[in-house]
Amino acid sequence: ANPAGASGEAPESLAEARREVQTCRRCDLNRDATQAVFGAGAARAALMLVGEQPGDQEDLQGLPFVGPAGRVLEGALQEAGIAREDIYLTNAVKHFKFAPRGKNRLHQKPNAGEIQACRFWLGLELGFVRPKVVVALGATALRALLERNATISSLRGTPMALENGTKLIATIHPSFLLRMPDRERAEAERQRFIEDLTAARKLA
Ligand code: URA
């Protein structure tokens, strides 16, 4: 009744899941997006990072975090001593949700139903990669990983254990830094973000 992808069977590997997600009809977001953007990186990474959903560039290129937020993330990862090729990077929701505005496509937040529908794919990624530590980048990722609502601020700084023993670290989404008008405050937030990523690296 609720097919994984078009085949309707549960994928048995990460590679199979990556193929199947392209035919996902668990919610309606596939209708307007260019393609599904599955996770990328080391298939047996000790550290997994989860964002919200692909943005405009990610939707076009088919890879997570290759747009502006990805550049912010890349810089912070470097400063935290983390190489992108050593980690697994994915999103809570695999299709870009947007509203057309002239020539542009404006990012829209995925709703609870979309996050829940896409939890199937995130669950597969967690199951196949089996990371020691998973980082929630922002509230959408946190909601997907905990399967309930929680604020970043209430969980930040204290790693918690998920059911399977994976440690969860909650931090901000990198695009939050792009939206901060005050340069000094943004830099302070960025340093805190780097601290969270460093803590994740040390735990992994
Ligand atoms: N923002 C996200 O949450 N994920 C991406 O892949 C890009 C931007």
Image (cartoon, rainbow, N blue to C red):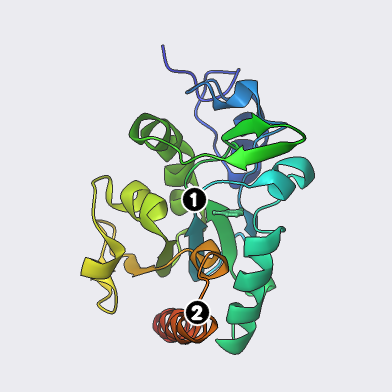
**Residue annotated with mark 2:** 186
Amino acid on which the number 1 mark rests in the picture: Glu
Q: Position of residue 135 (x, y in %)?
A: 42, 66
Is residue 204 visible from the viewing direction of this image? Answer: no
Query: What x and y, as percent, mark residue 100?
Result: 66, 30
At 29% from the left and 79% from the top, the residue drawn is 157
> What kind of element bears circle 1?
loop
Q: Which mark is residue 164?
A: none
Q: Quadrant of residue 1?
A: top left
Q: Is residue 60 left or right of residue 3?
A: right
User: As displayed, is residue 109 above or below residue 100?
Assistant: below
Q: What amino acid is labelled 2 in the image?
A: Ala
Horizontal side, residue 194 vs residue 42: left or right: left
**Label 2, residues with CA under 10 Å away: few <14, some 14-19, many ≥20:** some
Which sits in the foreground, 18 or 37? 37
Residue found at x 51% / y 25%:
4
Pick whichever of labels 2 and 1 is earlier in the sequence. 1
In the rendered image, residue 84, in percent from the top left (x then y), is placed at 66, 72
The quadrant of the picture occupied by the C terminus is bottom left
Measured from the top left, where is residue 83 in percent x and y? 65, 79
Label 2 residue SS: helix
Label 1 beta carbon less than 8 Å to ligand 1: yes
The residue sitting at the top extreme is 1
**Marks 2 and 1, how far apart at CA:** 20 Å
Q: Which of these two is toward me, 66 or 86?
A: 66
Q: Is residue 63 visible?
A: yes
Give me the residue at 44% from left, 53% from top: 126
Q: Nearer the viewer, mark 2 or mark 1?
A: 2
Q: Residue at x 29, y 58 (%)?
A: 164
- Identify the residue position indicated by label 1 in the image: 52
Classify 10 Å Cα crowding around label 1: few (below 14), some (14-19), many (20 and above). Answer: many
Q: Are marks 2 and 1 in contact (CB under 8 Å)?
A: no
